[in-house]
Amino acid sequence: KAKKERKKITEIKLLKEKPLEEGIIVNGEVKNKSAFIKTLGDFLKETKPTVRYAVVSILSNNIYSRLYSFPKTVTSEKLEDTMNLTIGFQLPVKPEDVYLDWEKVDGEKNEIFLATIPKPIINDYMEVLTAAGLRTVAVEFYPMSISRAIGLPGKGAFLIIIANKENACAFVLDGNSIKLNRFIPMEFLESETGKIVDFYEAEN
């Protein structure tokens, strides 16, 4: 008899947090580097086992993301060439001013998910993390972190909302793929949530 496959289980070894003082990070941007470095350094000294590497998850308000659909005949090298042309002509920002990446979405459709963020924002985070003694493995935004971390039940699309007192990140996950992402001020959350649902249901 074939051996049963062992189910992979993610185990949390350590879970800690340390609040930042007001004004260190504002709207997802580092505003006080020295205070951030000190707070992060103190946090790492208190943390055992020693943490040397980091995957950083940031707010999505400064992220431009978009889902592109292409004919199924566009594959492999053609797909990469097509995305390079798309980046040059359809982005609302200059490619040289942002860090960008894209990945193919799992599913029946031939879709690409692209995300960009202004370089100064990431550079500031990298400077702080390096000064605190951390080596950054990757930088991503909340929806991507959550899409990898949670296991959604069954098939179908889910609207997920992460909110605080001032704003909310609302995004649609279908399987483990981000299909739509919006950053919304709290006073517009209810009306915008309805629009997101209506739009996604109409498109799909």
Image (cartoon, grey):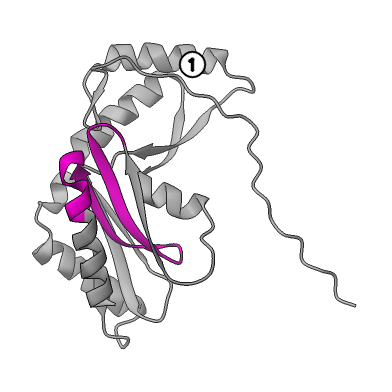
Q: Quadrant of the C terminus?
A: bottom left
Please state, as top left, top right, bottom left or bottom right, where the N terminus lies in the image: bottom right
Instruction: Name above or below for residue 6 compared with residue 185.
Output: below
Q: What residue sits 47% from the left and 11% below the top? A: 42
In the figure, residue 65 lies in which quadrant? bottom left
Under tag 1, what secondary structure?
helix
**Residue occupying the point 21% across, 21% down:** 31
Q: In this view, does 88 lie above or below 9?
A: below
Whole-percent x and y of residue 82? 22, 74
Residue matched to label 1: 43
Image quarter for residue 29?
Answer: top left
Q: Which amino acid does label 1 sit on?
A: Phe
Q: Is residue 203 left or right of residue 58?
A: left
Q: Give the range drawn in magenta.
A: 164-192
Residue placed furthest toward the bottom: 73
In the image, 142 versus 41, the foreground residue is 142
Q: Does the magenta stretch include residue 97?
A: no
Q: Quadrant of residue 168?
A: top left
Q: Position of residue 27 (x, y in %)?
A: 21, 31
- Residue 102, x across and y down, in percent: 31, 60
